[in-house]
Image (cartoon, rainbow, N blue to C red):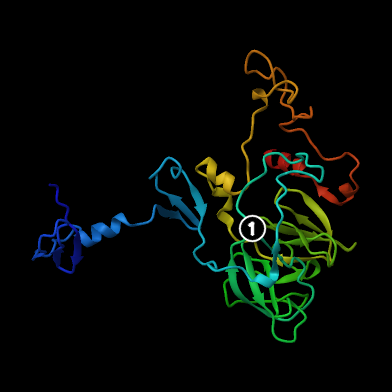
Amino acid sequence: MLRRLLIAPVGPHIQQGALLDGIQALEISVRPQPAGVLSLQEWCQSLLQSRHSTSSVGLKVYKPTTPGFRGRIITTRENLWSGRPYRPLTEGLRRTGGRNNQGRITSWHRGGGGRRLYRLVDFSRSQSEDTAVVDRLEYDPNRSARIALIKYPEGSSGGDFRGFSYILASQGVLPGDQIRSGASSTIRPGNMLPLSAMPIGQEIHNVELLPGRGGQLARAAGTSATLVSRGTDGYAVVRLPSGTQRRVLASCSATVGALSNPQHKNRKAGKAGASRWAGRRPVTRGVAMNPVDHPHGGGRGKQKGRISQSPWGKQTKGMKTRKRRNPTDAFIHVSRHAAKNKQRG
């Protein structure tokens, strides 16, 4: 009969547990392990270690214990709040699966994914100029950047009925820091000021297009815009992450610094299931379709037989999609294409 031992490490001794067939337990004294040799307790702990090892700041690189974990890289959440979000500033989020009100697919490759609560983020922060305190940093599944829960003092007009508010978290902002909004605020990460009160060359994010509407530009993780110049006509020139230089009203506000989670661009899903968790469905190649479904479809081979096109016959791979008579052309100081060609030249 095969007998199995239950061994439990106890200090310098090893207590040999009772055999499964009922034989009385024994206690064996073992000499301390020499230097450089793992004890049984250390060896057991090494087996219980996590599947990942952090190789870079802000990234979690998984060990290749399975084919799905091989090459999987995600961003760390070490200093983030591990509990549930602040419930008064959340609401339900209805998933459409890429369908419109007629049930037809208008946005491909969407569907599934985990359930989410939408966090009501304050992009304007123009209700109060009082000093707020960062209560905690949180993960937001609805955006790539981190968010911060701030607390306004009692009697302030900012925040909800308890004085709490969600904002985009800037790089370098930690729980306990004080942040302000308004023209009298100091130039430090997290503060929101009008463009007229910022120095030239300042790194900013969450830039407004109209005063009081709330930030609309440079809101992705790790991104930032730059205040290039400020004229006498009431406009300022801002260089966006795409390279476009755009004229914005100097009375519009922006937040100082770059956005948090700069390692977001270095993520790797590692397996198809990770994309399904995020609500992304598989992408079908056009050459694998029928001619009725895609311009690349059909034929006896795998050649598309034409230049790359979209399912609706529009050229891809470098073709400009901006409207020729766009009303906002008057606000484009330098286009991203001209800026890119200038860098190459």
- Residue 124, given in percent of the width and then of the height, sits at 77, 68
Q: Can see residue 20?
A: yes
Secondary structure of the residue carrying numbered label 1: loop
- Residue that mark 1 sits on: 116
Quadrant including the C terminus: top right
Quadrant of the image occupied by residue 30: bottom left
Quadrant of the image occupied by residue 131: bottom right
Q: Residue at x 85, y 66 (%)?
A: 211
Q: How many marks?
A: 1
Q: Nearer the viewer, residue 302 or 132?
A: 302
- Residue 224, given in percent of the width and then of the height, sits at 68, 57
Q: Residue at x 79, y 59 (%)?
A: 229
Q: Nearer the viewer, residue 337 or 59?
A: 59
Residue lying farthest top?
Answer: 300
Q: Nearer the viewer, residue 269 or 203?
A: 269
Residue 74 shown left or right of residue 312 in the figure? left
- Residue 150, given in percent of the width and then of the height, sits at 65, 75
